[in-house]
Image: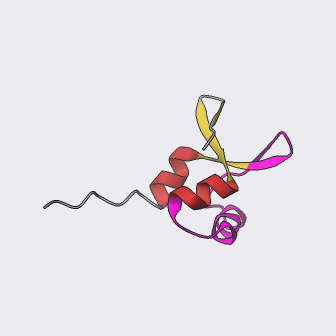
Amino acid sequence: METVRLDGRDWVTVADAAELGNVRAVTIYQNIRRGRLHGRLYMRRLAVPLDEVMALWPADEPEVY
């Protein structure tokens, strides 16, 4: 996964965001369209802020044994 730092925030591609959130790419696009995620073109690719992705789909807590 490659992040790009723009305007003080880390941004990732839609494909990387979907993988991080464990959702399909279409879900990322739907959330951009609904205003839950910001989308920005970077080098002809749509990118979303990493912090917003992590807020919507937080990583699972590790299992405690």
* Pick the front one: 26 or 8: 26
- Residue sitting at 71 percent across and 65 percent down? 29
- Residue sitting at 13 percent across and 61 percent down? 65
| Percent position of residue 7, x then y | 66, 29
Residue 48 counted in the magenta span: no
* Pick the front one: 54 or 37: 54
- Residue sitting at 67 percent across and 57 percent down? 15
> Taking 56 as reference, is 39 above or below it?
above
Q: Residue furthest right?
A: 44
| Percent position of residue 62, x then y | 27, 57
| Percent position of residue 34, x then y | 67, 67
Which quarter of the image is occupied by the N terminus? top right
Residue 23 counted in the magenta span: yes
Q: How did the renderer colour the structure?
A: secondary structure
Asked if residue 23 lies left or right of residue 12, the reply is left
Q: Which residues are magenta?
A: 21-46
| Percent position of residue 54, x then y | 48, 52
